[in-house]
């Protein structure tokens, strides 16, 4: 599939990114990043875009690491209950909901 350009606005700048996925997903991610950077700049009282971008990157990396950890825990829980007659589907569903 050919990549298509998508224009996004992040922290008062326009960027063109190439995607072979859903354009709306790219726009949603850009909006989330823009909101996060705006919030960080307001709290830090700094308009230094490089500093704000680094702090936003750290925040998003932390969110990703947390999601990966929860996913791994959910997979471990699923594997440990496989083969047992008492699979707790409700507990597993709740863990997956927390991840997503």
Image (spheres, rainbow, N blue to C red):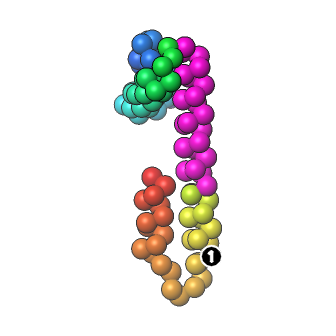
- Residue farthest along the left direction in this orientation: 24
x, y percentage for residue 91? 46, 72
The question of residue 67 being in magenta is answered with yes
Q: Which of 42 and 97 is in front in this view?
A: 42
Horizontal placement of 25 versus 69: left or right?
left
Is residue 30 at least partly visible in the picture? no
x, y percentage for residue 50? 59, 16
Is residue 65 at least partly visible in the picture? yes
The residue wearing badge 1 is: 80
Mark 1 nearby-residue class (10 Å; few <14, some 14–19, many ≥20):
few
User: Which residue range is magenta in the image?
Assistant: 48-69
Residue 8, image quadrant: top left
Q: In this view, does 90 lie above or below 41?
A: below
Residue ID at (58%, 50%): 66
Residue ID at (49%, 55%): 99
Q: Is residue 98 above or below residue 55?
A: below
x, y percentage for residue 22? 41, 33
């Amino acid at each position: 599939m050919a990549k298509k350009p998508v224009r996004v606005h992040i922290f008062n700048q326009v960027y063109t990114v190439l995607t072979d996925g859903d354009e709306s997903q790219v726009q949603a991610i850009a909006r989330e990043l823009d909101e996060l950077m705006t919030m960080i700049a307001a709290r830090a009282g700094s308009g230094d875009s490089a500093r704000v971008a680094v702090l936003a990157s750290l925040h998003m990396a932390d969110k990703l690491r947390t999601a990966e950890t929860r996913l791994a825990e959910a997979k471990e829980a699923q594997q440990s209950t496989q083969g047992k007659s008492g699979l707790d589907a409700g507990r597993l569903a709740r863990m997956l909901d927390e991840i997503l």
